[in-house]
Image: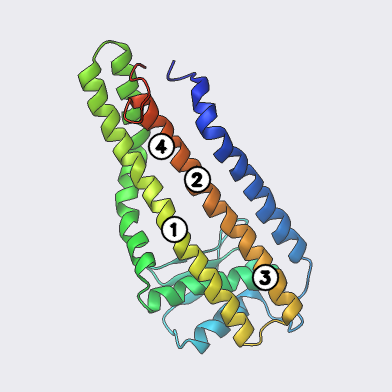
Amino acid sequence: MFFFDPLYLVFAAPGMLLAMWAQYKVKSTFAAYGEVALSNGMSGAEIANRILGVHQIRDVRVEPVDGFLSDHYDPTSKTLRLSPDVYHGRSVSAAGVAAHEVGHAIQHAQGYAWLQLRSNLVPVLGITSNLAMPAIMIGFLLASFGQAALGQLALLAGIAMFAILVVFQVVTLPVEFDASARALAAIESGRLVNARELDGARKVLNAAALTYVAAAISSALTLMYYLYRSGLLGGRRDG
């Protein structure tokens, strides 16, 4: 029953649908404003370096990375990696995404607490994310074979590890929202975009933020399902 539980869809479907819509929204918005050229003709890499210079951040490298919207800031090596469409792009989308990633570099330089917390969770998540699902499956399987006590122990361990993922994704929300706010402020105060381009960059970043919201909601709903099926949220403990 655990492996083919219709109840799972009751919990998970809303998050799955939201995630699908968020992915469509970010891709379509990025594509739309990827066709709108910046009036200053700067590339995403140039904008990133300009903002870093304004904030006197000299130890962060800006380099290209393969993939679509694979942009990220790596605090361990102080490297800002931009996807080809952003690194070389001279569009409103490229400006918004590049500035957003610089926002993370600024957070790092200023010791932003939420970013530090998320970074501290990364090594823990690297372990628990690989063990959570096997532990949960083993727990339900043991319960179905009459090993209730042992099954419940494995299940609780798996749920606890899965909960760390939910915490990580919730912590990610203020980090991403703050980075976008810093990005918009930087490109506006630095006069890197005009009013129309600023509005477009805001729409791109708002669409991107939806993906993080969707991921957090989806994981939280899945956690609620496991809690319910374990009996900790009023559900049944059978497998």
Point out the frontmost of discs 3 and 4.
4
Instruction: Tell me the quarter of the picture where residue 149 sits.
Output: top left
Residue located farthest toward the front when viewing the structure as drawn:
234
| Vertical side of 115 occupied by 15: above or below | above
Residue located farthest toward the left when viewing the structure as drawn:
149
Q: Is mark 4 on a helix, strand or loop?
A: helix
Instruction: Tell me the quarter of the picture where residue 203 sits.
Output: bottom right
Q: What element carries label 3?
A: helix
Tag 4 or tag 3, which sits nearer the N-term?
Answer: 3
Disc number for residue 100:
none
Q: Mark 3 points at which residue?
A: 201
Examine the rendering and report whether any part of residue 114 can be seen. Answer: yes
**Front residue (pair 42, 213):** 213
Callout 4, which amino acid? Leu
Residue 91 in percent (x, y) is at: 72, 72
Residue 92 in percent (x, y) is at: 71, 72
Cα–Cα gap, marks 3 and 4: 34 Å
Cα–Cα gap, marks 2 and 1: 12 Å
Q: Name the residue under label 2.
A: 217
CB of mark 2 within 8 Å of CB of mark 1? no
Q: Name the residue under label 1.
A: 172
Q: Residue at x 41, y 72 (%)?
A: 78
Tag 1 or tag 3, which sits nearer the N-term?
Answer: 1
